Amino acid sequence: MPADKCTDMQPKQEEENVAPSIPIAAVVKAVVLCCAYIAVSSALIRFNKFLMHADRFPFSMALTSMHMLVSFCLCLVFYMLRPSSFPGMANTEGKKLLLLTWFVPIGATFAIALYTSNQA
């Protein structure tokens, strides 16, 4: 084997040691968004716990239904106003029925989780 062919087969040392660089602003943004999500979720759980009292609003199924309806409507409005925020939707053309077979059970499980957490 010629010498130039042999060196091409060896991995280059510089390429192995190069790690992808992630801008610090992207990391900070991700951490802030995660913290905000956790804070909002915690606030919602605490508010639901306060609300689910016999004297205030003991209807956890109604609360769950309203929660899911508002979430669905807001997502739908957001999709209609800014479809570019949902880049994966372009890949679903012609596969909507197949997606329902995956998302309906996930949605049902989410509804059960919401209902049971509001009951607790």
Image (cartoon, rainbow, N blue to C red):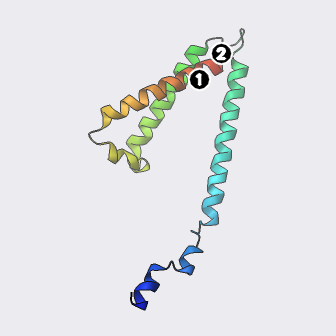
Which of the labelled discs sits on residue 119, or is there none?
2
Residue closer to the observer: 1 or 70: 1
The amino acid beneath tag 2 is Gln
Percent of width and height locating residue 24:
64, 65
Q: Which residue is mark 1?
A: 114
Which residue occupies the extreme front position in the image?
1
Quadrant in which the C terminus appears = top right
Percent of width and height locating residue 102:
41, 31
Query: Is 25 rendered above or below residue 91?
Result: below
Residue at x-position 66% and y-position 37%? 40
Estimate the spatial distance between the alpha carbons at disc 1 and disc 2, rounded to whole Å: 9 Å
Secondary element at tag 2: helix
Residue at x-position 57% and y-position 14%? 61
Which of the labelled discs sits on residue 53, or is there none?
none
The amino acid beneath tag 1 is Leu
Percent of width and height locating residue 36:
66, 44
